[in-house]
Amino acid sequence: MKYLLFIYSKKERWGILSLVLLNLVLVLISFSFKRPSYEFTEASIIAFQIPNSTILQDSFPLKTQIDSLFSFNPNNASEEVFIALGFSERVTKNILNYRSKGGQFYTTQSLKKIYGMDSLFFEKIKDYCQIPKDKSFSKKPFTKRFVQAKIQSKRFAFDPNTASKTDLLSLGFPKKSANALLNYRSKGGRIYKPDALKKIYGVSASFYESIESLIDINSTQLAGNQPKKPQKPRSTFTSKSGKIRPQDKKLEINSATQEEWESLPAIGPFHAKNIVKLRQKLGGFYNIKQIKESYRLTDSTFQVIEQYLIIDKRKIQKLDLQRSRFKEINRHPYITYEHTKLLMKAQREESLYSLEDLKKTGIFNEEELEKLIPYLIFPEADYED
């Protein structure tokens, strides 16, 4: 412990000594150099300055000097005026194109948003941009200003049940909302309360508030037309033709027309069309409960019509996966696009000649395959339900 230095080996002691000497040499060398001194004179500073005019000329070509600038309104200035002010041809063309499509400048800053507008050039001419204030427009976005101005131009009381399309458009109704209201009325629909107008497609809450005080519904005319809750008889029901359909008269779902579907209770043209459309895509129904897969057909509606339905599975159109084309296979609702691509690959390898071949491909899981089997036919065998 007395001679702690000697716990290192000879090579380690020489290494430590070498590092100490090297550090000492570096310190001595650093003191031998003199720091350079910089002296800045007024002449040298001016030599390195770049005139502002040079910067502006490099940024964009100016065709005019500051003294030749004059006040202008970007909403009505001509092409010659913009060119005289120093606007580039591209920016001038963009401004005129914007105005030709109904665009307007409401603030000076909005001119800066024109494509191609240089920020340095804008700072130069912004003080000369004079846009007169229009009291007819508020500070809200201009898309709403036109609607408000249009509504204020023609304000009169109206009955949504009798107003013409011209009247609705004059009041500021969007075209799609006016058409939706007229279509609703053509199908027997009526507006019994002002609030019901908000349910019309395209009628926003803000627009409804602007016309709420103008709504004048003739309640006397609608007194005898109040909607009544339909009563659904259990044993019989009346079709649109006025004929009574007995409960024991069944509807065969694989051959019924759209009109026959409409004769069922709780089934109108919308559901009848969707059911027929689904049947055509599937190639027929093999189970009555497949009707519930029709678009927007609720379970409660299905329970109402189930007692009137029968099925003939012999009318199902079957699909040959080995010989059918891509579009024919992909059209089936139970076969996805990814399934179709894999089936076409298996078809090229000629591995879809039997149900066992299809199972070996692993394209469908058990649940998918169970739904699909009634619609398949194979070249080597027939499979019945």
Image: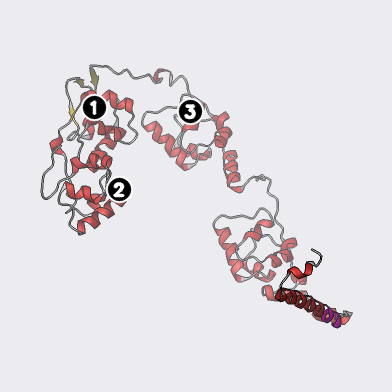
> What residue is pinned by disc 1?
263
Give the image location of residue 197, x and y in percent. Answer: 49, 31
- Residue 2 quadrant: bottom right
Q: Specify which label sits upstream in the sequence, 3 or 2.
A: 3
Closest to the observer, 91 or 334:
334
Question: What amino acid type should be assigned to the residue bearing mark 1?
Answer: Ser
Q: Secondary structure at mark 3?
A: helix
Assess whether residue 29 is covered by the magenta stretch: yes
Q: Residues within 10 Å of mark 3 (few under 14, many from 20)?
A: few
Dot 1 or dot 2: first in sequence order is 1
| SS for callout 1 | loop
Is residue 168 in view?
yes
Q: Residues within 10 Å of mark 1 (few under 14, many from 20)?
A: many
Vertical side of 136 occupied by 94: above or below: below
Mark 3 or mark 1: whose residue is earlier in sequence: 3
Residue 113 in magenta? no
**Could you say whether the residue bearing mark 2 is in a helix, strand or loop?**
loop
Tell me which residue sits at (22%, 31%) in the image. 288
Q: CA distance from mark 3 to mark 1?
A: 30 Å
Name the side, left or right, on which 369 lies relative to 116: left
Mark 3 — residue?
A: 196
Q: CA distance from mark 1 to mark 2?
A: 34 Å
Write the start and end of the magenta stretch as one range.
27-35
Q: What amino acid is at disc 2?
A: Thr
Looking at the picture, does residue 288 appear above or below residue 43?
above
Residue occupied by mark 2: 336
In this view, the residue in front, 326 or 372, is 372
Q: Kindly identify which numbered label has been placed on residue 143.
A: none
Looking at the image, is mark 3 or mark 2 nearer the viewer? 2
